Amino acid sequence: MTLTEIARLEHAGRVTLGWVPERYDGPARFAPVLAAVGSAAGILAVAASILLNLP
């Protein structure tokens, strides 16, 4: 395999990883996002309360 072929393969891999479809055809699902945000907020609240209560 030549250097040119290797360079083409590497470039093709990077382009494929960065490809985003023009539109999203699936239904919008907000419940998992809200669950993740709620969990993250809870974790941050617990961490903040622990840090504030340290002597």
Image: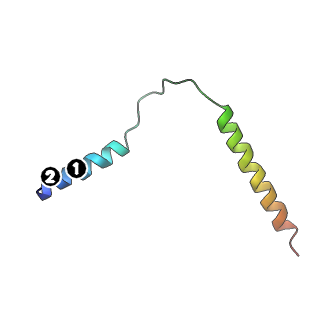
Relative image position of residue 26 (x, y in whole percent): 52, 24
Residue 3 position in % (x across, y down): 14, 58
Asked where in the image residue 55 lies, by quadrant, the reply is bottom right
Report how far apart the C-alphas of labels 2 and 1 lie in the structure: 6 Å
Residue occupying image coordinates x 81% and y 57%: 46
Residue lying at the far left of the rendered structure: 2
Mark 2 burial class by Cα count in 10 Å: few <14, some 14-19, many 20+ = few
Secondary element at image label 1: helix
Secondary structure of the residue carrying tag 2 is helix
Which residue type carries mark 2?
A: Glu
Question: Label 1: which residue?
Answer: 9
Q: Quadrant of the N terminus?
A: bottom left
Q: Is residue 47 above or below residue 8?
A: below
Q: Give the left or right position of residue 22, taking residue 55 as reference.
A: left
Residue 8: percent from left, percent from top: 19, 50
Residue in the image at 31% along x and 44% along y: 15
Residue ID at (48%, 23%): 25
Numbered disc total: 2
Q: What mark, if any, has residue 5 been given in the picture?
A: 2
For the residues bearing labels 2 and 1, Cβ distance under 8 angstroms: yes
Farthest residue, direction bottom: 55
Name the kind of residue labelled 1 in the image: Leu
Q: Is residue 52 left or right of residue 24?
A: right
Tell me where residue 19 appears, x and y as whole percent. Answer: 37, 39
Q: Is residue 14 above or below residue 25?
A: below
Residue 36 lies, with reference to residue 7, above or below; the image says above
